Image: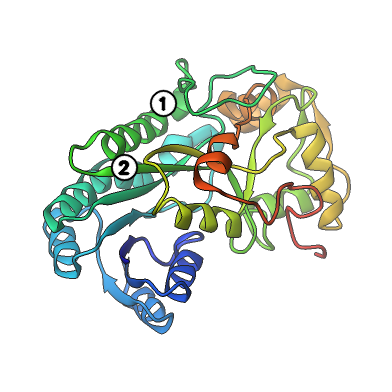
Amino acid sequence: MRVFVAGGTGVIGSPLVERLVAGGHDVAASSRSRGGARTITEQGANGVVLDALDADAVRRAVVEFGPDVVMHQSTAIDSIDPKRLDECFAATNALRTTGTDNLVAAARAAGARRVIAQSFTGWTNQRGAARARTEDEPFDRDPDPAASESLAAIEHLERVVTGTPSLDGVVVRYGNLYGPRTSFDSGGDNHRAVIERQFRIVAGGRGVWSFVHVDDAVEATVLAMTGPPGVYNVVDDEPAAVREWLPDYAATIGAKPPRKAPGWIAKRMIGSHGLRLMTDISGSSNERAKAQLGWSLEHPTWRGHLGPRSV
């Protein structure tokens, strides 16, 4: 197939391009920088310098390549402060709204048959479930004010991708990514915070997180090129409460056990959205992706694998 990947140098984009090229696909992938485009070319794909927010440039690049499939992997995530989530995600939110609109319009103009877009599952779920949430359940109807714009951007992306006539739209909702170049890898935000014992088990650590290794996320995305259109949670088999996965992660990287903190103190440091992440969010089910995409995970559990084994 001919595949155009918007965002070909990111945590998912780079290994995705490598996997597509190795699979014999004809690939073009974009980066916002010339250096990134050169890296893509060195992987055996056609590197394109492109701003996903420039509608005319996106249309020209996609139409010129003439893809069967357009993949939206464009993000601009740096450090994340849960007290200022929308501020930290402002650039990514623009890519999930305006960028999505531009890519979908370009895909239609190019005659592509399918668009696959990166989304997220985790704090977006309705909170407080004792079980893993499915794709058919609604998003959180009462998001924290610090995250409301980010949730609205995710909703926009999913609505446009799955609701555009003449396109088979696929949304891949990645869980919390771990593996190379993620926040759990050496030097990443979570790695640093755990080493410094700043990432604490708050108010019993009841918040449930779903994880997925980068390699498994890439594989699910490739399978989505030929699977049924729709929305898929791309997470591992084992959603886990903070009180369970955080000590395991600390042990895996050789850090001291995480400290504990009451909610009222933690709220001052991480804000009300951060408090929800630690105490009240729900995990996600991967049953649809396994059943409909034929997805088999190389890393079915996060246990012992969230980070590098030495500091």
110 displayed left or right of 98: left
Badge 2 element: strand
- For marks 2 and 1 on the same chain, the one whose residue lies earlier in the sequence: 1
**222 or 309: nearer the viewer:** 222
295 displayed left or right of 88: right
- The three-letter code of the residue at mark 1 reads Ser
Q: Position of residue 113 (x, y in %)?
A: 24, 52
Q: Residue at x 72, y 38 (%)?
A: 238
Q: Position of residue 90 (x, y in %)?
A: 36, 42
Determine crowd level at label 2: few under 14, some 14-19, many 20+ residues with C-alpha closer than 10 A.
many
Quadrant assignment, res 261:
top right
Q: Position of residue 295 (x, y in %)?
A: 57, 49
**282 or 257: nearer the viewer:** 282
Q: CA distance from mark 2 to mark 1?
A: 24 Å
**134 or 100: nearer the viewer:** 134
Compared to 40, does 189 lie above or below? Answer: above
Q: Residue at x 41, y 39 (%)?
A: 87
**241 or 159: nearer the viewer:** 159
- The three-letter code of the residue at mark 2 reads Gly
Residue located beneath label 1 in the image: 148
Compared to 118, does 261 lie above or below? Answer: above
Badge 1 element: helix
Residue located beneath label 2 in the image: 169
86 displayed left or right of 115: right
Number of disc labels: 2
